[in-house]
Structure formats: structure tokens, C-alpha cells
Amino acid sequence: MAGMRFDERLSWSGMALMLLVLYLFLYAPIAYIIYTSFASNTMWPFPWKPTIQAYEELSVNRAYQQALLNSLLISFGAAALAAFFATMGGIALLKYRSRWRGLFGIIFISPLFVAELLIGISTLMFNKQVLGLPGNMVSAILANAVHGVAFGFLIILTQLVRYNWRLDDAAMVFGATPSRVFREITLPNIWPAILGAFLISFLLAFNNLEISFYNLGAIPTLPSVAWGSLRFGVKDELLALTALVNGFVFIVFGILYVLMRTGLVRFGYRGE
């Protein structure tokens, strides 16, 4: 900053201050929850006395364990479906020219503009009255997949708009079948975007309350159990659960950041 003019230093300092305030606004509550989960006294202000009692209570709580298993099953199923349909939809939209592709794109992203409460209710009615599916795990997976496809579709598009489709055409000229072209040409180039779509859909389904609640009924998930336990106050095991979930998310995105910085994961085709 030594060579900057006064107005440039002022502008740089203002942006740095805004960025600091933004990070504090976003991450200070999460840091406080993690800090509190290791404290014996959760009333603020308090002298911090470290303990792992909250995590010990969480480890023996059967309700949270069953809810965690259900949330993982829903998340993996919904993320797999969302990543698959988002990938196929993105390829179809950008690879094959059609005057209707603008309409198809709007249809794919339309769940972004619909409240999760309405998605939960409408998918419950559709699955029950049209598909004959009662409120169960399958119904919840399908409903969360509808929500996740919209987010995954946008992630896939950011990759495919830079993809060189001439690679696929050249492979097919030399006799490769469409399935082989996808396995050996397209997939190795776009798999980071597919992974990103899977992860975003997984996190959305894992943390969702409204969609899963209406499609599951009495079957517990982590969000529904946590929401129900708040009626009796914030207990220690709930603090530990929140800290673990946030820690898992930070670890996943930290690994992705390291992979991108080291070049093991790259977004977009870099060749000619």
C-alpha cells in the first residue's frame, strides 16, 4: 500500500473493512456454537471450562443416531438423482441446439423460485395421488431431488459453457459410440462440476426441514429432531451436533479448496 494514492488506500481499507464485517456476520455465530459445545457453562458471559460432555451425551442419544442415519440416506439418494438429472439436462441443453432450450432451462431452475414449504406439500400430494407413494423415505428422496436439481443444474452449466464440444465430435468421427464418448471424453472433463452438484444437493437435502417433514411424517431426520428438541431449550447434545455438522461442511470445502489450489481438480476444459 506504500505506492497507493490516498483515495486508493481509503477505498482498499473500506473494502477490507466490509469484508471483515461480512465474515464476522457469517461465521461468528458458527464459531460461538463450536466454542460453546466444548464449554461446561453455556451462559454468556462465562469463564470457559473445556469439556466433552456434550459429545458424550450425543454419542449415546439413540434418537439423534437414528435421525442421522435417515438424513444420510435421504441426502445420498437425493444428491445422486439431482446430480444425474442436472448433468443430463445440462448436456442436452448446451450440446443439442433447440429453439425450446430457453424454456427447458427455465423449467430446470424453477424450483429456485418456489418456497420449500410449497415443494414439500406439492410433492407429497403428487407422490401420493399420482405415483401411489405414501409419505416415506422414497418420497422424501424424490422431493429433495427436485429441489437439488435446480442448484446442481446451475453448477453443471458453469462447467459446460466452457466445454469444447468438438472433442466429442472428433471422437465420434473416429468411431466412438456416444456412451464411450461420455465415459472417456466428457466425464473426465466435467466430473468436478458433477461432484460440486452432488455436494450442494447433499447439503441441501441433509439440512432441509420443510420438504422432508411433509414427505416423511413421523420418520425422524436431524433437522426435525433438532427442531423438536428446541421446545425444551438448547441442550448440550444439540450444541455438539451443530458443531459437528458445521465442522463436516468446513472440512469438505477445505478439501475441495486444497484440491483446486494444487491443480488436482480443475473446472473447465483448459486445452485447445
Image: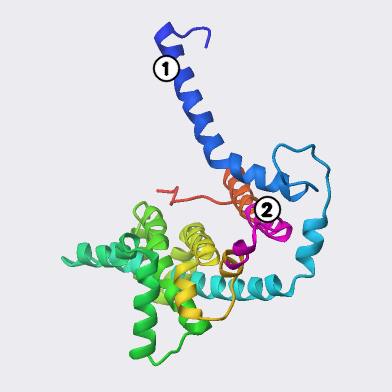
Looking at the rendered structure, the kind of residue marked 2 is Ala
> Residue 102 at x, y = what percent?
21, 62
Q: Is residue 232 magenta-colored?
A: yes
Residue at x-position 56% and y-position 72%: 76
Q: Is residue 84 visible in the rendered structure shown here?
A: no
Circle 1 residues within 10 Å: few <14, some 14–19, many ≥20: few
Q: Residue furthest front?
A: 232
Secondary structure found at label 2? helix
Residue 11 is tagged as 1
Q: Which quarter of the picture shows residue 44? A: top right
Residue at x-position 54% and y-position 36%: 23
> Residue 62 at x, y = what percent?
73, 75
Q: Using the numbered discs, state the Cα–Cα distance from disc 2 to disc 1 in whole angstroms.
A: 36 Å
Q: Which quarter of the picture shows residue 82? A: bottom left
Q: Is residue 42 magenta-colored?
A: no
Q: Is residue 103 visible in the rendered structure shown here?
A: yes
Residue at x-position 35% and y-position 70%: 118
Q: Earlier in the sequence, mark 2 or mark 1?
A: 1
Residue at x-position 70% and y-position 58%: 235
Secondary structure found at label 1? helix
Q: Nearer the viewer, residue 89 or 168?
A: 89
In this picture, which residue range is highlighted in magenta? 228-246
Work out whether 54 lies above or below 176.
Answer: above
**Magenta-colored segment: predominant secondary structure:** helix
Circle 2 residues within 10 Å: few <14, some 14–19, many ≥20: many
Looking at the rendered structure, the kind of residue marked 1 is Ser
Q: Which quarter of the picture shows residue 72? A: bottom right
Q: Nearer the viewer, residue 260 or 224?
A: 224
> Circle 2 sits on which residue?
243
Q: Nearer the viewer, residue 57 or 155?
A: 57
